[in-house]
Amino acid sequence: MSDATTSRSDLAAAFADESALVSYVAAGDPTPAATERYVEALVEGGTDVVELGLPFSEPVAEGTTIQNAIKRALDAGMTPDAYLDLVDSLDVDVPIVCMTYYNLIYQYGDGEARSASENASGEEPRAKGPEEFVAAAAEAGISGFVVPDLPVDESGPLYDACREHGLDLVFIVAPTTTEDRLERMLDRTTGFVYVQGRLGTTGARDEVSDDTPDALARLQDADVPKAVGFGISSGEQAREVVASGADGVIVGSAYVDLIADGVENDDPTSEVADRIGDLAAELKAGAADGVPEPEHK
């Protein structure tokens, strides 16, 4: 067993009793206040882990739906500090995962002012890195990170900072991930492993990919729960994914589509929240239905 599996994990605990629903929305889409209500609706609908996106201007892993959500959030003024304030204000009893890109984590803080101060005092300037943001995230109430553009071979500083502050680091395993890289990912993955159920970017799909069972089979001996994302948008799809061996499902674009429709139609936040909560309830029920019945001896 690797070091990555020995610490207590709020995320792993979310998978302990039943199939987990991990739900994504972009922070600040379309406003922080709306996001707060949408997160509450997700939890009321049965969400076990909230994946709250910290918007970045170059979201390479995202499809058009989430790219548009990120643009709406950035246009509305979302920043890393505003994100942390939003997390701190949330009153929900489930773990919050920060989904973002490494540049924001690495560059966080007043690096230039800090370096100038240290140079004036004769001290060696401190290198930029993830420690400052991870510490701030832990203080705000974040339980872990998903960082799609961070290669496992370059993840040491973030991994160390997460361990220092008791946070999980979740890696995304794609259908194209090599066996050697998969082994290194699992050695550093904590909380759960994010299984990319299909090739390509995020986005709701009508059917579960044929790649999903094979992707799960590769991870059958993993020491952490397996959650499948990319393309899930209905309770029936959630049922099918869990029946294939997943410990949970990750859904994002289906919720973001509802938010985008609300923005386009100028619907009240409360109405959009109700739709989000209803979808979460459908997905949670579908995931529960996918759990195999226990064998009776």
Image: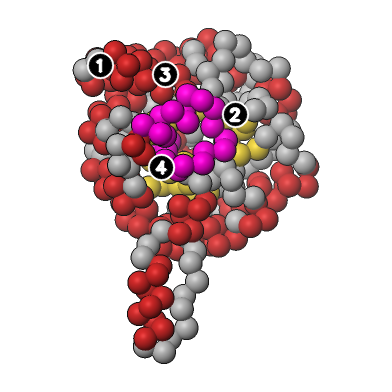
Q: Label 4 sits on what residue type?
A: Leu
First in sequence: mark 4 or mark 3?
A: 4
Q: Which residue was labeled with disc 2?
A: 201
Counting residues from the start of the chain, the first of labels 2 and 4 encountered is: 4
2 or 1: tag closer to the N-terminus? 2
Name the secondary structure under disc 4: loop
Count neighbours of disc 3 (C-alpha within 10 A) and say few if under 14, some if 14 to 19, many if 20 or more.
Answer: some
Magenta residues, start to end: 51-72
Q: Residue at x 71, y 31 (%)?
A: 175
Dot 1 or dot 3, earlier in sequence = 3
Viewer-side residue, 238 vs 3: 238
The x, y position of residue 196, in whole percent, is 62, 31
Crowding at dot 2, Cα within 10 Å, few <14 / some 14-19 / many 20+, comes out as some
Q: Nearer the viewer, residue 243 or 33?
A: 33
Q: Are marks 2 and 1 in contact (CB under 8 Å)?
A: no
Q: Are marks 2 and 3 in contact (CB under 8 Å)?
A: no
Where 293 falls versus 29 (above or below)? above
In the picture, the disc for residue 266 is 1
Q: CA distance from mark 2 to mark 1?
A: 28 Å
Q: Residue at x 50, y 53 (%)?
A: 103
How far apart, in angstroms, are the residues tagged by discs 4 and 3? 18 Å
Location of residue 245 (image quadrant)? top right
